[in-house]
Amino acid sequence: MEPRRVLPSIDPDIRRASTLPGWFYGDRELFDRSRDAIFAKSWQWIGDADRVRVPGQAEPLALLEGFLDEPLVLVRDGDDELRCLSNVCTHRGHRVVESPGKLRHLRCRYHGRRFGLDGCFQHMPECEAAVGFPSAADNLPRVALEGWGKLLFANLEPAVPFADLIAEVERRVGFLPLDRLSFEPRRSRDYLVHAHWALYCDNYLEGFHIPFVHADLAETLDYGSYRTELLPHASLQLGIAKGAEEAFDLPPSSPDFGQRVVAYYFWLFPNTMLNVYPWGVSVNVVQPLAVDRTRVKFLSYVLDESKLGSGAGALLDRVEREDEEVVETVQKGVGSRLYRSGRFSPAREQGVHHFHRMLAAALG
């Protein structure tokens, strides 16, 4: 049996640091360990509040489908409170809610155990003789649920409060009427990328490649003014207009007031991107499937249709395909027997360095 490989720490000084070793992107043991060490403790997008709009509505879902696959159910109870509950019956483990619907209570069809819309145990037939029954353990566990505008995020065992994670997002773009976000399915789709999930994030977290890979995007963004800001559990890349592109009408209270910002690219550790444009928000969820397979969900939420089709957020599909091609090529390259690790550009790769330090701390 081969000894477990240890992920090296990353020097906090980017000028001296090296990237994660190439073997990391093909290591199945570390990939599997990240389920509990990283993803089970992270905030994951689960949709928006329109999924369950009225009291009694319930909709089953899988948290981070294809990787965590934790069965959950979104429920709006009789008091109009939105809840996220475990969707596994506390009797013998059957799914409780199997299809969306409007319900008076939650009932498991296996043996008839019934729960209220708040997840509390109500009734179980043929259990009158059970001692110490029911107890709190018979309730459906409640899962941490938070919202940003209409967008919903759940977390099985939060390592970071959601308020801390989203604080800078609120400070920069909280002036937008995010409660009016409207999901646009025609502009949303899934992409299958033949690469490690972290390699996809590496590429997202730097604008260094934009002039070399994204010719059209480079015509929109002022590369010289493009910058990265590091946050405790996230990062922000700020896109400034190169020409007369549609930019945000920033309020005087904005820390960016006076600048022609065309895009805020927020990354929330480990796998969520909130790309905010004058037309709305593009949510990207990076879903690991295998050590060399990743699903990337592109979800478009529109605020102003009149601004679609222009600026940095106009060619999302083309930019994504360009990113896919280069990331898949890199996946092959880091698997080379002759590749070890690389060095960071101190001027352009602060976000990647930040990410690698977080990964090394979580998995090292």
Image: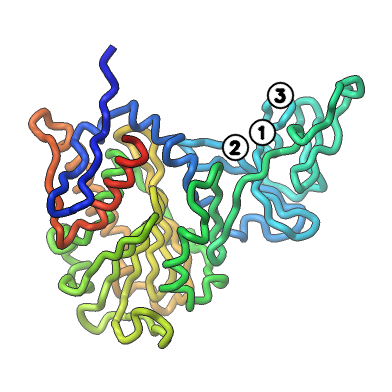
Question: Is 361 positioned to the left or the right of 132 in the image?
Answer: left
Tag 2 near tag 3, CB within 8 Å: no
Q: Is residue 138 visible?
A: yes
Q: Residue at x 52, y 36 (%)?
A: 69
Tag 2 near tag 1, CB within 8 Å: yes
Q: Residue at x 18, y 42 (%)?
A: 330
Tag 3 near tag 1, CB within 8 Å: no
- Which residue is farthest right? 128
Residue that label 1 marks: 88
Residue that label 3 marks: 92
Question: Is 113 positioned to the left or the right of 326 in the image?
Answer: right
Q: Is residue 203 visible?
A: no
Alpha carbon of mark 2 to alpha carbon of mark 1: how far?
7 Å
Q: Amino acid at mark 2?
A: Pro
Q: Secondary structure at mark 2?
A: strand
Q: Amino acid at mark 1?
A: Val
Q: Residue at x 46, y 58 (%)?
A: 165
